[in-house]
Amino acid sequence: MAPRTVLAIPTSTLRARLVRQGSVYLATRAANGALALVHVWAVTRAIGPSEAGRFFMIWTAAWLLSVVVRFGTDGITARAIAEADVEGRPPPSLLPLLGAGAGCGAALLLPTVALLGLPLTVPVVAVTATLAALWATTGFAASVLKARARADLSGVVQNVLWPLAPTLVALAALGRGVSWTLLAAATAAAAFAALVASLLLARHTIGYDVVRALVSPGEKRVRVRHDELGAAASTTLAEVFVWLPVVIGAALGLESAAMAGLFAATRVAGVFSWGYQAVVATLVADLARAVAQRDHRFARHLLTRGSLAGVAVTLPPCVVGAVFGEKLLSIFDSSYSPWGTTLALLVAARLLDAAAGPQGELLLVGRRAGVGAAAVGSACLAGVATALALEPALARDAVGVGGLIAFALANGAQASYVWIWLRRWHVSDTGGSTSCVEASSSRAGGSALP
């Protein structure tokens, strides 16, 4: 098949799609935020703060493991499809990456459960593994939709179908006196129903051809190489980054009831970034295309637009969250309100993340995932160290300070590298290099990336 010339999308077309799909994704993020709040409230009311702390730890363990199982395919999927489109061929198989992810997830299962203070019993380990596998598959389906420039439907899968199932289970458990382990098992059953619904939606909208090509043992495969390992590390560390306050709490040895309040603050803080995440989701496919074509102007345009739009939709709710954080946490349980200052600091970190723009996403689709992993990993270590050092003076507020420091360091390091990297594209282009699309025409099966 002859390579196709993929042109940069006109600004008017990009703006129209950004508004259309961004609006839908924004609505799904709003739904996700509402479902997150209802879920935390329902779990706390159903089993009490102490038992809720254990349930939230199994939730955190399963979510982090699900990211490990996906092994960086969130960004690699968009990159693989963009390269295939530029070169006029079907997308390559990601089966080697998914197999490696499954192996890494199995190896890290017991250490993760132990790290978060959960009992190493058969029911707990089995439920954690089941949730991780189901959530990983659901997340992969959402990634394929996003890579196919259907960020709106990706949002429906990841932001509505995925959280709706456990929220309904938690609401059904109210007043029934269930244990936290039974609630976790019921959540796993609901996660399977959400996965089935997600796959049916993907089949109806983009068909199974793309998904089949990505998971079949085809001749052309994405091998597990240095960059793929970097992508896996980057996406995994990005989730550790998001849930870093919970990890810090575990490192500080907080009791179960206190961990429940910290989990609530961490999850509520995530709600205030749903606007920025909507903006980023609509830009992933175009960022991958900009890298595949080595178009530094288009890449800068996307980064600037993402930053400005992200701040515009993130700043108003963040101000509200910082001012009324303590009252918001008290809605779930009065014992959660002391985490109000931590919530305000975490909300400020989300605003900083939006202002930096989609730097991490560009690194992921641009074969610079190792840079992102190094930036985020070192920032996480600095955040944990800061919290441990300040804990004697600031008590629980040290958790929020550590989280804010980590966000500042990671975003600063990534932004510095990205803008220097893009400047090198410009120098290379002015030096007489051919465009990426032209280069791909002269290289049989060659990569379209620098």
Image (cartoon, rainbow, N blue to C red):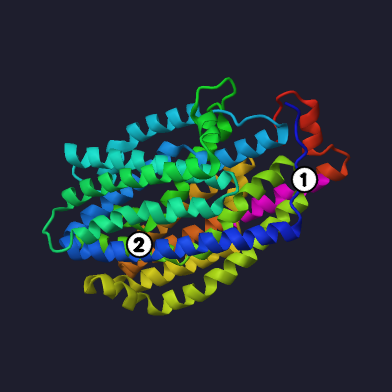
Task: Point out the image quarter for the N terminus.
Answer: top right
**Boundaries of the magenta span:** 412-427
- The disc placed on residue 36 is 2
- The disc placed on residue 145 is none
Q: Which residue is mark 1?
A: 7
Q: Is residue 203 left or right of residue 254?
A: right
Tag 1: amino acid:
Leu
Please check the rendered image and state whether residue 423 is part of the magenta-colored stretch, yes or no: yes
Please check the rendered image and state whether residue 201 is part of the magenta-colored stretch, yes or no: no
User: Of helix, strand and loop, which one carries label 2?
Assistant: helix
Tag 2: amino acid:
Ala
Q: Residues within 10 Å of mark 2 (few under 14, many from 20)?
A: many
Q: Looking at the picture, does residue 422 appear above or below residue 5?
A: below
Q: Is residue 348 left or right of residue 109?
A: right
Could you say where residue 296 lies in the image, as x and y percent from the top left?
A: 76, 49
Real-space Cα distance between discs 2 and 1? 40 Å
Query: Which residue is at 57% across, 61% downward?
Result: 22
Q: Is residue 292 visible?
A: yes
User: Of helix, strand and loop, which one carries label 1?
Assistant: loop
